[in-house]
């Protein structure tokens, strides 16, 4: 039964996908290379212990209650429609994988900077009126790095807790308790209670509903579909789902409590910029950055550098802050300007391709989303377990958020001008914040460093991608060479702190 439905769904997806332009990989369900049965002892980020929230002991497989659940499960499977079976295939790729994908799509949809109004001002999005113009949030790179970090941490902490209870109670999958049940997805020896998919669904829903409050009806539908898909597939009985949902919701609520106190509420404090400009002038910056738009747009999140970091403290952040960049009256600065002028005159097709590929501007899920996609696909290709995929995304996600915080601290500390303030133009969008250091370079180097640790056989590939992303900002005339080179160095240091955390999390890697 599994093979025939998988073949039908595969052909259906093939025909449907002919009309799509998004280049996403083929994702079929698999049995993980390792079940990571010791994951219940891995170090969590926000939970004080994997057992901070209690999951009650389930009924035994021989109980009348469980047998009634098996009967209900069979009924639900036999009544599943073709659309239900398509949902089974979709969610069969993995809960963490799919919810990260959903989050990236939301980020791209909300990555639209507010337009100026009739008074020549730029309204600030209002979280209490998320669908009004301008919509909340404006999913810029710092916002996306933060949203995906909290999502990944909630998924990971919830799954570590779930693994602890799975191995404690050791309830087998429904098809291993009833041989007449034919599931639609591959079944492993991982205990089914609480359901890992329900844990991730509830945790993800809680985070994304807070980060994208205008999308709650959409998220409601996704949550219901994710839970039902496990039953349409014959993978979990209702009590598996209910226990997982309650655990995921509780863990995510605690993660959101941390988010509410991390300083993001003051990230857009425009009153600080005058002092930042004065500080930059004292450091030797003759021409501080200024908006090149008409009317002038307020700088993006000037106080994001004050948001709480994950893998190092603020003293460390200051200690690893890049040194003062080349100043206008130096030979090095003139060399960087000369390089940009040469590219402006003689840009090659390959340079233009790279600049556009990595632009990640409005309407995209930004560099943090770009690297989350790389991380998710790499973990999927490696056939990681659900909890190890979540660990991968949490390590990369916290490194990316730390990179955004540390980079924004650097940008507004030095407040350096963009090349456009010296007559250069760009075709890939003009960022509305200071130049030094390059966000693309810092984000990319941090993520590539962490991914190289998790997938050492591909480390040179990730490093090359980070270098290309960095070069793209020079080719696009967005940054001086020094912005990018120092961003790469800074990002690697930030990634190394995430690696140190990973090496101490008891995961065996």
Image (cartoon, rainbow, N blue to C red):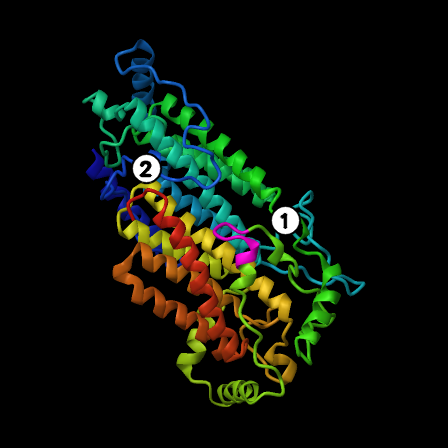
Q: Is residue 495 left or right of residue 331?
A: left
Return the residue nearer the eye: 283 or 3: 283
Secondary element under disc 1, as helix, strand or loop, is loop
Whole-number angstrom distance, CA of label 2 to CA of label 1? 31 Å
Question: Residue 196 appears at what percent x and percent y?
Answer: 36, 33
Furthest-top residue in this view: 64
| Residue drawn where x is 23% and y is 34% of the image | 188
Whether residue 126 is visible here, answered yes or no, is yes
Q: In this figure, what is the number of numbered marks? A: 2
Secondary element under disc 2, as helix, strand or loop, is helix
The residue segment tinted magenta is: 309-316
Return the residue nearer the eye: 382 or 295: 382
**Residue underneath mark 2:** 39
**Against 174, is 34 above or below?**
below
**Mark toward the start of the polypeptide (2 vs 1):** 2
Question: Residue 489 appears at what percent x and percent y?
Answer: 45, 69
Whether residue 78 is visible here, answered yes or no, is no
Q: Is residue 179 left or right of residue 399?
A: left
Question: Residue 227 appears at what percent x and percent y?
Answer: 41, 31
Q: Residues within 10 Å of mark 2 (few under 14, many from 20)?
A: many
**Against 179, is 161 above or below?**
below
Say which quarter of the image contains residue 236.
top left
Quarter holding the N terminus is top left
**Residue underneath mark 1:** 263
Which numbered dot is residue 424? Answer: none
**Against 471, is 251 above or below?**
above
């Amino acid at each position: 039964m599994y093979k025939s439905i998988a073949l039908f769904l595969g052909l259906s997806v093939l025909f449907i996908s002919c009309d799509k332009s998004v280049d996403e990989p083929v994702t079929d369900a698999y049995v993980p290379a390792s079940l990571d049965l010791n994951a219940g002892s891995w170090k969590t980020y926000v939970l004080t212990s994997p057992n901070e929230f209690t999951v009650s002991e389930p009924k035994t497989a021989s109980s009348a209650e469980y047998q009634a659940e098996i009967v209900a499960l069979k009924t639900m499977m036999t009544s599943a429609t073709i659309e239900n079976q398509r949902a089974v295939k979709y969610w069969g790729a993995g809960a963490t994988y799919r919810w990260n994908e959903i989050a990236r799509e939301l980020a791209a949809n909300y990555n639209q900077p507010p337009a100026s109004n009739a008074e020549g001002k730029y309204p600030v999005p209002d979280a209490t009126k998320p669908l009004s113009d301008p919509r909340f949030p404006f999913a810029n790179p710092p916002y996306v790095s933060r949203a995906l970090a909290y999502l990944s941490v909630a998924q990971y902490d919830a799954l570590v807790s779930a693994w602890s209870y799975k191995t404690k109670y050791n309830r087998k999958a429904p098809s291993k308790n009833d041989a007449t049940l034919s599931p639609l997805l591959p079944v492993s020896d991982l205990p089914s209670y609480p359901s890992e998919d329900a844990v991730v669904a509830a945790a993800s829903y809680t985070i994304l509903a807070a980060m994208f409050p205008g999308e709650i009806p959409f998220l409601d539908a996704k949550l219901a579909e994710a839970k039902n898909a496990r039953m349409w597939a014959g993978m979990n009985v209702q009590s598996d789902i209910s226990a997982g949902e309650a655990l995921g919701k509780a863990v995510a609520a605690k993660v959101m409590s941390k988010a509410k106190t991390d300083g993001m509420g003051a990230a857009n404090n425009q009153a600080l910029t005058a002092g930042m400009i004065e500080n930059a002038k004292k450091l030797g910056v003759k021409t501080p950055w200024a908006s090149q738009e008409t009317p002038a747009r307020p700088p993006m999140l000037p106080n994001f550098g004050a948001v709480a970091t994950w893998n190092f403290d603020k003293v460390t952040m200051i200690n690893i802050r890049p040194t003062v960049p080349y100043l206008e009256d130096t030979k090095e600065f003139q060399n960087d300007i000369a390089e940009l002028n040469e590219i402006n005159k003689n840009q090659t097709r390959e340079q233009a391709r790279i600049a556009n590929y990595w632009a990640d501007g409005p309407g995209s899920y930004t560099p943090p989303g770009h690297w989350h996609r790389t991380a998710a696909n790499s973990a999927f290709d490696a056939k990681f377990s659900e909890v190890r995929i979540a660990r991968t995304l949490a390590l990369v996600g916290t490194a990316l958020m730390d990179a955004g915080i540390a980079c924004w601290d650097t940008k507004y500390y030095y407040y350096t001008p963009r090349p456009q303030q010296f007559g250069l133009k760009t075709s890939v969008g003009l960022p509305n914040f200071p130049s030094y250091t390059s966000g693309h370079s810092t984000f990319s180097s941090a993520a590539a460093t962490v991914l190289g640790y998790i997938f050492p056989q591909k480390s040179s590939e990730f490093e090359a991608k980070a270098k290309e992303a960095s070069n793209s900002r020079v080719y696009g005339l967005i940054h001086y060479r020094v912005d990018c080179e120092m961003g790469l160095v800074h990002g690697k240091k930030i990634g190394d702190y995430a690696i140190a955390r990973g090496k101490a999390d008891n995961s065996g890697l």
